[in-house]
Amino acid sequence: MPLLPRKGLLAIAAVIDVAVQAPGRPISAKTLAARHALPPRHLESVLQNLVREGILKGIRGPRGGYELAREARRVTANDILRAAGTVDEADNEPVGSELLSKVVLPALSSAEQQFGIALSRINLEDMARDAEALGT
């Protein structure tokens, strides 16, 4: 049972792809989409969210594309998922039925918090190093 949505996994993979590029050589959305077998329009909104949140920097022009906006060691999996819009911030508004809001959500709250903490320990620098070891 996957705990993360496909969109979140793709966002992490795209940011790793950007991280392993040579500095000063942005990678285009078209190239990223091709590497992950997606239509470019599908990935573009995720990339724009990552730019808005300061994880990626968009470079315009014929040799443009995306590059990291900050050091890889300062970007976590949790940062990427939040920026991509795949992790909801906790709100105090009741959701759905009383059973859902008073039993299910409180029961799972601790697990969600622990999962978020674990995702915050996974940094982009480590994932990029693993990707480079694979030769991707």
Image (cartoon, grey):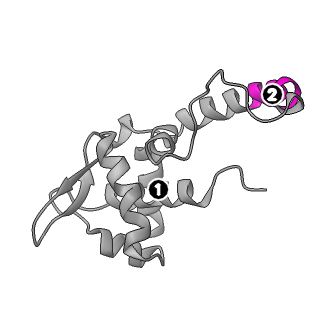
Type of secondary structure dominating the magenta stretch: helix
User: Which sits in the foreground, 77 or 44?
Assistant: 44
- Of the residues shown, which amino acid type is indicated by label 1? Ala
Q: Is residue 100 left or right of residue 134?
A: right
> Magenta span covers which residues?
101-111
Which residue occupies 61% across, 33% down? Answer: 116
* Residue 102 found in image quarter: top right
Residue 101 on image: x %, y %:
80, 27
Q: Which callout, 2 or 1, points at the residue further toward the start of the chain?
A: 1
User: Which sits in the foreground, 5 or 94?
Assistant: 94
Figure check: 37 above or below 128: below
User: Which sits in the foreground, 2 or 24?
Assistant: 2
Which residue does the numbered mark 2 point to in the structure image? 101
Residue 130 in view (yes/no): no
- Of the residues shown, which amino acid type is indicated by label 2? Ser
**Which mark is nearer the camera, 2 or 1?**
2
Q: Residue furthest left?
A: 61
* Residue 59 found in image quarter: bottom left
Residue 11 tag number: 1
